[in-house]
Amino acid sequence: MRKHTVIWIIAVLLVLVLLIWFGKTGSVRDLPEIQEEGRMSVLIESGEHGFTRDSVHVYGFQYELIRRFTDSLGVELVVINEDKTRDGMRELTNGACDVLVSLRPVMIDSVRSVVSLNPILSTRLMLAQQIDSTGKLLISKQYELDGDTLTVMKNSPFMVRLGYLAEELAINLTINDIAVDSPDEIVKLVNDKQIKYTICPEYLTGRFKARYADVDFSVPLSFKQDLTWTVNKKSPELQKRLNAFLDGFIGTAEFATIYNKYFSQPLTTNH
């Protein structure tokens, strides 16, 4: 009797796990469901390049772009701030958000459960490093990172690129990831001499140079790569509509105005 009770309990637990699993995976929405509900949920990067707020306003480069898209749909924009406690890809896969509004390298792996949209920006990855007391750089060539440690944000989308860099240069590069909320926060750690090196997309370096005089951003770690947002593969209509919006908006005077409002680096896109 006791054995049958144990088996029954295990069976019930398995059913509950399956229900929870299918409930999560089944929550992924496409454009018709979003329009019917009148709300679109996005997980968005923290910082002026993504989303930030003060006592009066909410603003940010990517926030302004996605807001124009939801306005064009006539739906409410629901913002979930991406911070050190969240893994955007996991939440997108599970349907916790409709769009991952985070500028990440374009993925070409069709096996993934998420897909990249058309490119928004094209940029290089730069080394952010301390400047010594004489104004000399610690690193002037990529291969000089051999045997050193590079500190990046936890869940950084550039980890794969850094792995390729170490392989290409045949160097022993330790990559340490830490929980911070934004690129600004980790660059400040370099400025305050709490870490020696981190990485920074080139389009962010203009603002950071003005804020952090003791940090150098002149050494590139990659060629230009396309960056964009990500959606779930189960949302093909949303993907199509967002791509059409980006293709029609990027390259316009309005897009350039928004870009110049937040960045000092020259605008580079593939549009």
Image: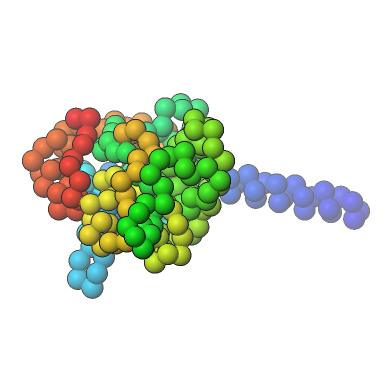
254 is higher (above) or lower (below) than 131: above
Identify the residue at image location x=90%, y=55%: 2
139 is higher (above) or lower (below) than 84: above
Identify the residue at image location x=77%, y=53%: 9
Q: How many marks?
A: 0
Judge by depth and name the residue closer to the eye, 76 or 142: 142
Residue lying furthest left: 253
Identify the residue at image location x=27%, y=57%: 208
Residue 210 visible at all: yes
Relative to 225, is 110 on the left or the right?
A: right
Q: Position of residue 139 (x, y in %)?
A: 41, 47
Judge by depth and name the residue closer to the eye, 170 or 255: 170
Q: Position of residue 98 (x, y in %)?
A: 37, 45
Q: Quadrant of the C terminus?
A: top left
Q: How is the image coloured?
A: rainbow
Residue 228 visible at all: no
Q: Position of residue 30 (x, y in %)?
A: 36, 38
Judge by depth and name the residue closer to the eye, 78 or 19: 78
Identify the residue at image location x=11%, y=37%: 252
